[in-house]
Image (cartoon, rainbow, N blue to C red):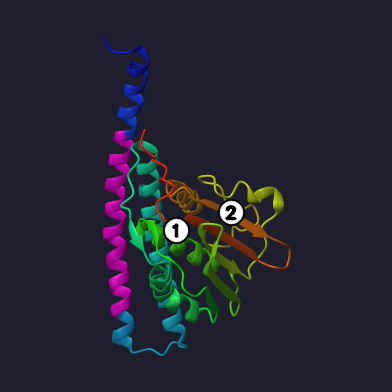
Amino acid sequence: MKNPANLEREPSSARARQTLELISFLTHEFKTTLTSIITSAGLLVEELALSPDDTKAKLISNILASAHNLEARASELLNLTKLEAEGFHLELEPVDTNTIVYSVVDQLSPIVHSRDQSLTLNLAPRLPTIIADSLRVEQILLNLLSNATKFTPQGGSISLTVNRQNGYIVIEVQDSGPSIPLEEQHKIFQPYYQLKGDKEHILGIGLGLALCKHLVELHAGKIWVASEPGKGSTFAFSLPLGTSQEPVSNSQ
């Protein structure tokens, strides 16, 4: 005989699976269309042979940036839905943090350059490897650094710092954008939350930081933000060194 508690959970579990299937289908459809937009815009730049300072080139660059932004938000929605509906296990392996940092920087360099921003790397020497899911760590850092480029004004500065502290690798992304009010700092890692005064920015649907929090905590790490008026914001996360601390499982 089934446990009554299990009977109560089954409909909810079925709905979660149906929701996941629907979002997976929609995400696939979105990405197919966005891939066409991104490819066409890229070919248009080549066909017109425009200089970076040309007005048409800047407009096409905005189209590409917006399309990439939508693609990233669709992926965030799918990943967060998977986490909440069924969970997933990390693919743990020895990871060189510097390799991930350089990969993310390479991906975002065109955006940083197009906005005339400066990106400074501060990497501690002889950093040890960590036991982590390299794709997920890259996803976390890509999200944080992408946010920094959005909120930092044209010609502003961004810094990325990696060091070792008390048995953890700590990665910090500092921007020179608007500060985050103290009363809102503890809310920004909640799903669907958006800062009240930033409607002019392309924020998506408020899932990126929530997803980062999930992924960091799956690695038994922590994520936080520090922000002061006139000094921008610093988003940081820590990941434990070695295998002494088992990652948190998200499976139900």
What kind of residue is marked 2? Trp
Where does residue 246 sit, x and y in percent of width and height? 41, 45
In the displayed structure, does residue 215 sit left or right of residue 91?
right
Answer few, some or many: residues within 10 Å of disc 2's Cα (few below 14, many 20 plus, some between 14 and 19): some
Where does residue 64 sit, x and y in percent of width and height? 39, 71
The residue lying at 60 percent from left, 76 percent from top is: 157
Write down the residue under mark 1: 140
The residue lying at 32 percent from left, 63 percent from top is: 34
Where does residue 196 sit, x and y in percent of width and height? 64, 52
Residue 121: in magenta span: no
> What number is the disc on residue 215?
none
Task: Relative to 87, say whether 30 is above or below.
Answer: below
Look at the image and tell me whether residue 70 can be seen. no
Task: Relative to 220, say whether 233 is above or below.
Answer: below
Depth order, front residue of 72/55: 72
SS category of the residue bearing label 1? helix
Answer few, some or many: residues within 10 Å of disc 1's Cα (few below 14, many 20 plus, some between 14 and 19): many
- The single residue placed furthest to the front in the displayed view is 244
Residue 23: in magenta span: yes
In the displayed structure, does residue 214 sit left or right of residue 234?
left
**On the rendered image, what quadrant is the N terminus found in?**
top left
Write down the residue under mark 2: 224
The residue lying at 27 percent from left, 53 percent from top is: 29
In magenta, the rendered stretch is 17-43
**On the rendered image, what quadrant is the C terminus found in?**
top left
- The single residue placed furthest to the top in the displayed view is 1
How many numbered marks does the figure carry? Answer: 2
